[in-house]
Image (cartoon, rainbow, N blue to C red):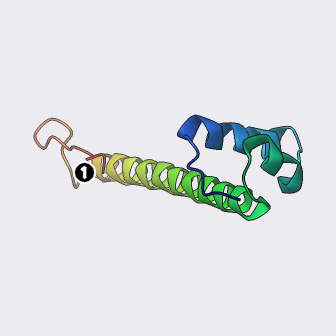
Amino acid sequence: MAKRALTEAQKNRIWQLSEEDGFSQSKIAPLYDVSQSTIHNVLKEKRHEAEIAELKNQMQNAMARGVQAAIEDGSVSPTNSPLYLEDK
């Protein structure tokens, strides 16, 4: 089977077919003319992306709670010390 680059839209659709629609990797592979292992790798990549997004979200929430706690205990003044959370 020739190497074939999948677009991001195709990868997203593969994720949907697998995770939401319940298709097996071996059923999805022929739809995109790729191997089952390619589908496996796409799904692994998408799982990692989802995990990273969730961890970033948790970190932002924790930082916000920490800032709020610092304001509440008086160690940071909400009017004198502007706080910025950088999106990295």
Answer left or right for 17 relative to 53: right
Quadrant assignment for the N terminus: bottom right
User: Could you tell me the amino acid type at mark 1?
Assistant: Gly
Q: Within the image, what quadrant is residue 16 found in?
A: top right
- Between 30 and 83, the residue placed more toward the observer is 30
Q: Within the image, what quadrant is residue 14 found in?
A: top right
Residue 3, horizontal then vertical, whole percent? 60, 57
For the point 36% across and 46% down, the residue is 68
Residue 76, horizontal then vertical, whole percent? 21, 50
Residue 33, horizontal then vertical, whole percent? 74, 47
Q: In the rendered image, which residue does mark 1 sit on?
A: 74
Circle 1 SS class: loop
For the point 22% across and 43% down, the residue is 84
- Between 44 and 5, the residue placed more toward the observer is 5
The vertical placement of 39 against 19, above or below, is: below
For the point 52% across and 57% down, the residue is 52
Answer left or right for 32 relative to 85: right
The vertical placement of 40 against 77, above or below, is: below
